[in-house]
Image (cartoon, helix red, strand yellow):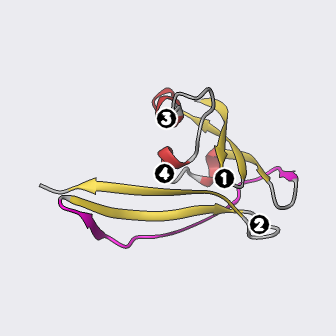
Amino acid sequence: MTQLKLKGSGGYVIADVTEIQAKKADLGVGELFLAPLGRIEESKISKYFCKNCDAEFDNSPKIEFENPNETVAEGMILKERGHYACEKCNGVIGEYREFSKTE
């Protein structure tokens, strides 16, 4: 596990991630992003920064999610949709989607 900065549209989180997760978060632009990783366990997040509050917090943001299990394309199901939210202002730090393929 390595502690890395993962960016979202409304800030970033500092989290312990595996080498495989780090590769998945790297979109080839020199920064790592939250969205490709899906939901990260709160216990793995040590800090986050909220752009709305312009402040860093020494804990995990709130993680809010739902499991719609809806078909979004032929053979593709949206399993989970969620976001990381600031505990102080409720601003969105980053969003994610998790999909699964059907046979």
Residue 73 rendering spot, x and y as whole percentages:
24, 62
- Label 3 sits on a secondary structure element that is helix
Q: Earlier in the sequence, mark 1 or mark 4?
A: 1
Predominant secondary structure, magenta span = strand
Please count the marks in the image: 4
Q: Earlier in the sequence, mark 3 or mark 2?
A: 3
Q: Earlier in the sequence, mark 1 or mark 2?
A: 1
Q: Which residues are magenta?
A: 55-74
On the rendered structure, is 56 left or right of 27? right
Where 72 sits versus 35, above or below?
below
At a point 45% along the width and 30% down the height, the residue shown is 20
At a point 34% along the width and 56% down the height, the residue shown is 99
Q: Rounded to the nearest whole Å, what is the CA distance between mark 3 and mark 4?
A: 10 Å
- Residue 47 in the magenta stretch? The answer is no
Q: Residues within 10 Å of mark 2 (few under 14, many from 20)?
A: some
Where 29 sits versus 74, above or below?
above
The kind of residue on which mark 1 rests is Ser
Residue 40 rendering spot, x and y as whole percentages:
55, 50
Residue 80 rendering spot, x and y as whole percentages:
41, 63
Q: Mark 4 = which residue? A: 38
Q: Mark 3 = which residue? A: 21
Q: Rounded to the nearest whole Å, what is the CA distance between mark 2 and mark 4?
A: 19 Å
Q: Residues within 10 Å of mark 1 (few under 14, many from 20)?
A: some
Q: Mark 1 = which residue? A: 9
Image quadrant where residue 87 sits? bottom right
The kind of residue on which mark 4 rests is Gly
- Label 1 sits on a secondary structure element that is loop
Q: Which mark is residue 87?
A: 2
At a point 46% along the width and 65% down the height, the residue shown is 81
